[in-house]
Image: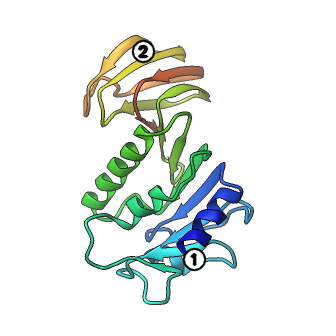
Amino acid sequence: MLNRIKNYLNENGSVIHIVGPLTQSFDSDPNEPTLFIDGGTKLKKDYGFSLGDNDSFQGELDYKLPEDKDFSDLQFALTLIPTQTETLYLHGFLGGRKDHELINLGEVAHFLFERNETKVVFDDKITAYSQGFWKFELQNTFTLFSFHENTLSLTGECRYQLIKQSLKPFSSHGLSNEAEGKISLHNSAPLYFFEVSK
């Protein structure tokens, strides 16, 4: 079964969805591979695969993980994501228990540390970027946050620009910037981008 899941993700894996236990509703293109993690399996369609240790879903999963393990269901799912994946959407991994939420953010940072030009989007609220060059357009307040030592260049239509500046892990240096248009970002390590609603 695990090989079937890996082949499925590799067939059209530039964009992949992972549906977690806190997801309330889910609708996506069936051509975009989807993994349903444990409790997220309640929203499973007629496509995709489910996996987990059955601690938040009472039915049968396509691939069952052991209950006693030293890794999370999400961490395991991330090991299955093919190298060609450019965008990974995580649904239902924010909110709930704070320890789970922080660990989910940390696992994605570790995942991205081995990647280039890959982004992970959490519920359209937080985006994590692997090292690389990024361009986007934004008219809002935003915060940059890193789990790793990072060197940043941030230019374009934003209030606070950075040229090869060091951003320490858990630093407030990237807090509350203001964007008014096109932004360019270059980061040397995974970086979290929080858009703050006005």
Which is more toward the observer, 40 or 111? Answer: 111
- Give the quarter of the image for residue 139: top right
Q: How many marks?
A: 2
Residue 177, how many percent across, how many down? 42, 24
* Vertical arrangement, residue 54 with respect to residue 193, above or below: below
Q: Residue at x 41, y 34 (%)?
A: 190
Q: Residue at x 34, y 28 (%)?
A: 175
Q: Which residue is mark 1?
A: 43
Q: Which residue is mark 2?
A: 160
Which is more toward the observer, 64 or 193? Answer: 64
* Vertical arrangement, residue 2 with respect to residue 14, above or below: below
Are dots 1 and 2 in contact, CB under 8 Å?
Answer: no
Residue 194, how many percent across, how many down? 43, 38
- Is there any visible trace of residue 9 in the rendered image? yes
Residue at the limit of the structure toward the bottom, as seen here: 59
- In terms of secondary structure, where does tag 2 sit? loop
Residue at the limit of the structure toward the top, as seen here: 163
Q: Is residue 137 left or right of residue 100?
A: right
Q: Residue at x 41, y 63 (%)?
A: 76
Q: Residue at x 53, y 55 (%)?
A: 81
Circle 1: residue type: Leu
Q: Distance from label 1 to label 2 (Cα)?
A: 42 Å
The disc placed on residue 127 is none
Residue 96, how many percent across, how many down? 33, 65
Badge 1: few (under 14), some or many (20 or more) residues near its Cα, within 10 Å? some
Residue 8, how many percent across, how many down? 65, 65
First in sequence: mark 1 vs mark 2: 1
Which is more toward the observer, 69 or 90? Answer: 69
- Give the quarter of the image for residue 151: top left
